[in-house]
Amino acid sequence: MLCVDTTFCVELSKGEPAAITRAKKLDAQRERLAVPAPFLTGFLIGGFAKGGHRLKSALDLNSRTEVLPVNGAIALEAARLAGQAIQDGRPIGTLDLLIAATARVHHVPIIMRDRDFSAVPGLTIETY
């Protein structure tokens, strides 16, 4: 199982070639994808707001991912990561914290292309 981040999903819905290529490889490998529930809500809001192809892509992602709820363990891990990031002078947004904490608690890699999570210790990152 892989946890996906916002950038990957947005780029996939926009038809970005690198994201599409990676998604095809994941499909061929029958890799399960997971997303934290708060992320999925935000992503679906964007799809419903844009409509058309963006909505179709968002709903397709929803049908192909395992939604991981935010529970006490994930909230605790997100808060711990946030505290450390603040101490290090590199604060991380709440949504990114929930995604990183979800991946860490479930011991799954996260697929991404940006550097938002590079400062999170113990997080396995796969790029595309």
Image (spheres, rainbow, N blue to C red):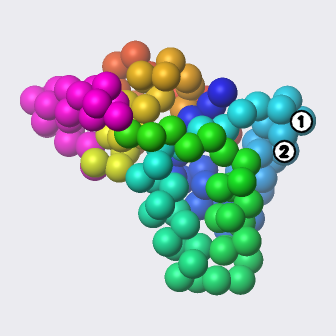
Q: Main secondary structure of the magenta part?
A: helix
User: Marks 2 and 1, how far apart in space?
Assistant: 6 Å
User: Cβ–Cβ below 8 Å for labels 2 and 1?
Assistant: yes
Residue 81: % across, % down = 24, 29
Q: Which of the 4 image quarters holds residue 16? A: bottom right
Q: In this view, does 90 lie to the left or right of 8?
A: left
Q: Which of 127 and 61 is in front in this view?
A: 61
The amino acid pointed to by label 2 is Lys
- Mark 2 lies on a secondary structure that is helix
Q: In this view, does 88 lie to the left or right of 128?
A: left
10 Å crowding of disc 1: few (<14), some (14-19), many (20+) = few
In the image, residue 103 above or below residue 122:
below
**Which residue was labeled with disc 2?**
24
Instruction: Please report the residue visible at 40 percent of the width from the left and 16 percent of the height from the top.
Output: 122
Tell me where the magenta segment starts and ends, as one range: 71-93
**Which residue was labeled with disc 1?**
28
> Which image quadrant: the N terminus?
top right
Let me know if residue 78 appears in the view: no
Q: In this view, does 26 lie to the left or right of 103?
A: right
> Which image quadrant: the C terminus?
top right
